[in-house]
Image: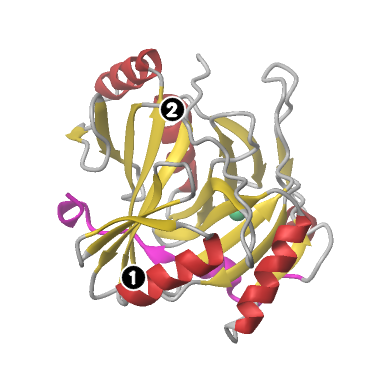
Amino acid sequence: MTVLDHHLIRAGFRVPDLERSVEHAREILGVNVASDDGRRVSLALPGQEPCLILHAADTAEFDFMALHTTADNLAEVRRRLAAAGVEIDSAVELHGDALRVHAPNGVAVEIGVGEGHARNAAERDSGPVIGSLDHLSFAAQDPGAFRDFFVDLFGFRLSDSFLDQRHWLRCSPNHHTVAVFAGSNGIHHYAFETSDVRGLARLGDVLAARGQNFVWGPGRHGIGGNIFTYHLDPAGSILEVTSDMLQVESEEEWEIEVWSDAEKSGVLWGPLPPAGFRDMSTPVIAATESA
Ligand SMILES: [Fe+2]
């Protein structure tokens, strides 16, 4: 089936304390407020379109993810969705030629015509220099159905799996832009990229100054090969900052590996995850509320 490349450009969350979540994102990620109507704040890295949308709500929930692609790719995705009988909604976040559908775990996925972000490299006094939104790792009761949804309908490629329980999917050379773990439907973590391990040290320093610490890491994942840290944002969602993700330079030569070593697939070096880490997730907003 034809390979389709896309760019992950934006994610949205509902958060119980909008002010705290915005402050955290600004200090930790270096994003700026692009718009703020008191209930909805859009945040952008320097020189980019918004990458993170935060909505005030009673509880923390994942709202949507948005991809940009070419007009030809969008036409192909639309054709595949129609052929599969998937209900197609109007896009809420993206403008112009765009659509919204729901993945099997309830996640709202928008795709529209547009460019990817130019990688941010603007220096800051403290905190990591974040290049861009990197990937989203979801939890799904049926991870195979979630994988097939992105592969069959959106043209993603399976990069690697852990048994039949976790799958890492790419839509560009980046080893994974979307991943899925078996679990209750939701998002496990959202990830931003920094250029090197120095950025992770700067993140640790700024977290320490806030009285926070990592919940896991630093370490290097076996699957994807990326160096990672994870900490909790003010809404209790897991935020990963990562660097050195494996790049798949040749679609033809990439060989999918099905890992069975739970420890090495998760961490080649560094601490093991805390108990219960893989079972954590932020629920997905109910489809009827997300418009
Ligand atoms: Fe990740």
Q: Is residue 215 visible?
A: no
Q: Amino acid at mark 2?
A: Glu
Please say whether residue 280 is one of the residues in the magenta stretch.
Answer: yes
**Range of residues picked out in magenta:** 272-291
Of circles 2 and 1, the one toward us is 2
Against 226, is 20 above or below?
A: below
**Point 71% across, 20% down: residue:** 250
SS for callout 2: loop
For label 2, count other residues whose C-alpha is less than 10 Å away and answer few (under 14), some (14-19) or many (20+).
Answer: some
- Residue 252 placement (x, y as % from top left): 70, 16
- SS of the residue under disc 1: loop
Residue pushed farthest right? Answer: 269
> Which residue is tagged 1?
60
Question: Where in the figure is residue 182, as x and y percent of width and height?
Answer: 51, 55
Residue 215's spot in the image, x, y percent? 63, 75
Which mark identifies residue 115? 2
User: What colouring does the structure picture have?
Assistant: secondary structure
85 is higher (above) or lower (below) than 136: above
Q: Among all residues in the image, which is located at the extreme bottom?
A: 211
Q: Is residue 127 left or right of residue 232?
A: right
Measured Cα–Cα span from mark 2 to mark 1: 29 Å
Q: Amino acid at mark 1?
A: Ala
Is 74 included in the stretch rendered in magenta?
no
Residue 245 visible in the picture: yes
